[in-house]
Amino acid sequence: MMWLAFYNENVGDVLLLTRGGGVPDDFIETESQGNVTLIKDRRSSEVVSANIFNMKDAIKPANNGNITLTEADLEWVNEQIQAVGFDLTIDVDNTPKFVVGYVEEVEAHEDSDHLSITQTDIGDEVVQIVCGASNIDEDQYVIVAKPGAVMPNGAIIWPGELRGEASNGMICSTSELGLSDIDDMPGIWELEDEFEPGTPLEEVVSFYRG
């Protein structure tokens, strides 16, 4: 999995890089050199995250959450890591993490009275997403948080399982996205207009806000 880049001003002047979630705290170990800290899964010694401190002089993020790193930014990142002696090269995934999805299929989860299993087209692939919203249905256009998306509350979406069924993303409500000013209905955000699956959330927001 390629690396993902994040920024959160509440954390401080730190570039957060990760390529995996779900490592239990008991198995995390850290190694620091200079302005770089690596976070590893000690069971495998795999580096799962990296923090680079004092980053604002070189990289100026426009927002919290997922950030895009240019080629120049990435060159700076790798220079910082390798200058302190770590043998690690970062290659980031800059693709949009919040996109339009088209719900092709919905079936009830056999082990739940409220979960549904969807097959949702997100543009480049059809993914299975387990959804707990009562208003989920076929032939809907929705917003999907793909694996690697950072929600406004700081939570990162990773692939996982719900009641034994794989779930590769999250179908979102406007409140979860911080967009209740556009639509404040309960449940997932049912887009009133048709959009091409894979359309970035920013384009949808611009369309509705005019």
Image (tube, rainbow, N blue to C red):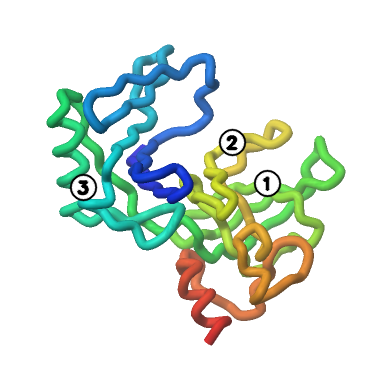
Q: Which residue is under mark 2?
A: 160
Label drawn at residue 63: none
Q: Which residue is mark 1?
A: 130
Q: Nearer the viewer, mark 3 or mark 2?
A: 3
Residue that appears at 37% across and 55% down: 67
Please name the residue shown 76% across and 61% down the image. 187
Among numbered discs 1 and 3, the one appearing first in the sequence: 3
Residue 91, image x, y percentages: 25, 42
> Residue 186, how many percent across, how many down?
78, 64
Q: Left or right of 107: which side holds 159?
A: left
Three-letter residue code for mark 3: Leu
Which residue is pictured at 45% across the width and 55% down the height?
64
In the image, taking residue 8 as reference, residue 118 lies left or right, namely: right
> Would you name the residue on which mark 3 appears?
74
Secondary structure of residue under mark 3: helix
How much space separates mark 1 and mark 2, taking CA atoms? Answer: 10 Å
The one of 34 and 194 positioned closer to us in this rendering: 34
Q: Amino acid at mark 1?
A: Val
Which callout, 1 or 2, points at the residue further toward the start of the chain? Answer: 1
